[in-house]
Image: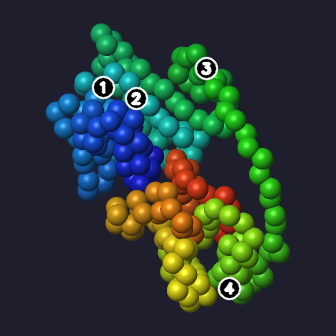
């Protein structure tokens, strides 16, 4: 997964075991690693996995390789799968490497054929009712921030819970954050939380953790929060419908 999702997944897995990250569960991402001599589960980004496969095609010491959210189909993920299949065929005759592809949307049969007709395991999830409302399209030359700010203010007035707002980039996040701060004034019950890949770990964690009691969050995010992350307490999602 992405760096933020890798850290969040490792922290959640470690908490389920009642441990700290770096014991049984660790992670490796660009410029940061938290693993120890007892680590048996490593959560890594696709880029880290690809480089590891280039250095160690056999993945010595690894029994199971899991590709989560495989339907996102990045170049690194596809290359890592190809390298792992090649390494398993060439170097793992005695102890075959097990490979698990996880996806919410891809056709399992097609992936199974790629993996020598591997079995397909299905897990039916629960669907929750979602009400969708559409705004008018943005016009050429129209600034995105004023309409997003007004939509957020309307949602804060009519809905409970926290809000997740998708914006195309960091510049839009900064401007919307500033305009919302001015509009909300001294309201201590609303927390504005930017979320993008360039933030430090503490700021990213503040965005995805549950809001403190008596407060609500407005998370202003890039597409970093579209997959692999769960932000507790979010009741309304506002998508500007724009991407960069």
Residue placed at 68% from the left, 64% from the top?
160
> Which is more toward the observer, 241 or 79?
241
**Which residue is under mark 1?**
62
Q: Nearer the viewer, mark 4 or mark 1?
A: 4
Q: Nearer the viewer, mark 4 or mark 3?
A: 4
Q: How many marks?
A: 4
Q: Whole-percent x and y of residue 68?
A: 50, 37
Q: Secondary structure at mark 3?
A: loop
Q: Is residue 104 visible?
A: yes
Residue placed at 24% from the left, 46% from the top?
34
**Which residue is under mark 4?**
146
Name the outermost residue toward the left.
37
Separation of residues labelled 4 and 1 (CA atoms)? 51 Å
> Which is more toward the observer, 189 or 64?
189
**Which residue is under mark 2?**
65
Badge 1 vs badge 2, beta-carbon distance below 8 Å? yes
Of pointers 2 and 4, the one earlier in the residue sequence: 2
Name the outermost residue toward the top.
94
Q: Whole-percent x and y of residue 200?
A: 34, 66
Give the number of the disc on residue 107.
none
Q: Secondary structure at mark 2?
A: strand
Badge 4 vs badge 3, beta-carbon distance below 8 Å? no
**Which residue is under mark 3?**
120
């Amino acid at each position: 997964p992405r760096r933020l999702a890798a850290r969040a997944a490792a922290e959640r897995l470690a908490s389920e075991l009642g441990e700290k990250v770096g014991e049984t569960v660790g992670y490796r991402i660009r410029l940061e690693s938290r693993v120890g001599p007892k680590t048996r589960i490593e959560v890594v980004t696709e880029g880290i996995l690809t480089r590891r496969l280039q250095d160690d095609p056999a993945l010595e010491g690894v029994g199971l390789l899991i590709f989560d959210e495989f339907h996102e189909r990045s170049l690194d993920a596809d290359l890592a799968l190809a390298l792992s299949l090649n390494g398993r065929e060439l170097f793992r005759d005695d102890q075959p490497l097990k490979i698990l592809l996880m996806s919410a949307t891809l056709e399992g049969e097609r992936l199974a054929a790629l993996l020598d007709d591997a079995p397909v395991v299905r897990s039916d999830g629960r669907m929750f009712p979602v009400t969708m409302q559409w705004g008018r399209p943005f016009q050429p030359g129209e600034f995105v921030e004023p309409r997003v700010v007004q939509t957020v203010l309307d949602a804060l007035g009519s809905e409970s819970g926290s809000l997740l707002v998708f914006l195309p980039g960091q510049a839009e996040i900064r401007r919307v954050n500033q305009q919302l701060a001015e509009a909300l004034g001294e309201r201590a019950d609303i927390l504005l939380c930017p979320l993008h890949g360039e933030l430090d770990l503490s700021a990213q964690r503040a965005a995805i953790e549950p809001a403190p009691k008596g407060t609500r969050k407005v998370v202003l995010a890039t597409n970093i929060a579209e997959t692999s992350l769960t932000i507790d307490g979010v009741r309304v999602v506002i998508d500007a419908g724009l991407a960069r």
